[in-house]
Image (spheres, rainbow, N blue to C red):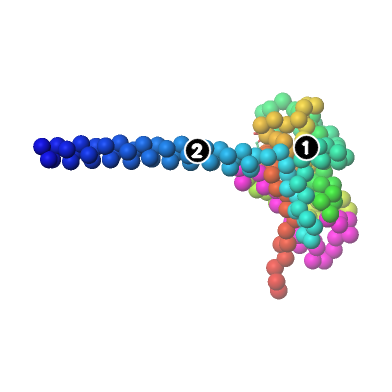
Amino acid sequence: MERDSLACRTGTKKKESAMRQGLASILFVMLASLAWAASASDVVRVSVPGQPAWQADRQAVAALPHTEVTAKAHDEPPATWRGVSLAEVLKRAGLPLEKLRGRALAQYVRVTAADHYQVVFGLGELDPTLGNANVLLVDERDGKPLSEDGPFRLLVPADARPARWVRNVTTIEVLDGAASP
Ligand SMILES: Nc1nc2c(c(=O)[nH]1)N[C@H]1C(S)=C(S)[C@@H](COP(=O)(O)O)O[C@H]1N2
Ligand SMILES: [Mo]
């Protein structure tokens, strides 16, 4: 009899703890989706040494001079993309380009996506008076704003593979790659 009621009590406790665990996982999912919603905002953060970070939204990027390219990833049909050169974005964020020399040429640009995919470019490669590489921050494909890959995607038309065509760009940073002697 006593053992039965003990078993019964443990049963209730087990149920209670299962319920608590259930509630905890629901709460976790809710908090995780809130955090995701906060991170998936429609801005790209551009940070340049010595300048306040620039949070550029769709409108701010749309206001910069655009160029158009036709390019295709893998077996997709070719698309018409419109975007702003990465050098222009950096200039707008306050980076003095075109007079790069010495230590400044040890800088690199790191582009980060919402899924933490990252690629880098040497700053000298992007400088219009040096490498002048065509690297675009695109915001339009076939006349429409980017949807699931956007709002911003990187496009490197000259690349033989689209591995640096970073989808869902969230951050563009100029960083110092110099090593001390
Ligand atoms: N954010 C993000 N961008 C990414 C990737 C990724 O994993 N995450 N993969 C890259 C690779 S390896 C390729 S081949 C292309 C594929 O682009 P597609 O899906 O438009 O064909 O996206 C690139 N951009
Ligand atoms: Mo890839």
| Residue type (three-letter) at the residue carrying disc 1 | Arg
Q: Position of residue 25 (x, y in %)?
A: 44, 39
Q: How many marks?
A: 2
Q: Which residue is mark 1?
A: 58
Q: Where residue 109 is drawn, which disc sits there?
A: none
Figure quadrant of the C terminus: bottom right
Task: Provide the secondary structure element on which disc 2 rests.
Answer: helix
In screen coordinates, is 9 left or right of 74?
A: left
Does the numbered disc 1 mark a residue whose Cβ is under 8 Å from ligand 1? no
The residue at 77%/44% (across/down) is 56
Question: For the residue carrying disc 2, how many other residues have a C-alpha within 10 Å: few (<14), some (14-19), or many (20+)?
Answer: few
- C-alpha gap between disc 1 and disc 2: 29 Å
Quarter assignment of residue 150: top right
Which stretch is magenta?
Answer: 95-116
**Quadrant position of residue 66:** top right
Instruction: Specify whether 135 is left or right of 99.
Output: left
Residue behind mark 2? 29
Q: Is residue 56 above or below residue 73?
A: below
The kind of secondary structure element at disc 1 is helix
Residue 130 pos. (x, y %): 85, 54
Q: Position of residue 116 (x, y in %)?
A: 61, 46
Name the quadrant where ligand 1 sits.
Answer: top right
Q: Is residue 69 above or below residue 97?
A: above
Image position, residue 106 (x, y; %):
76, 62
Residue positioned most to the left: 1
Q: Earlier in the sequence, mark 1 or mark 2?
A: 2
Does 121 appear in magenta?
Answer: no
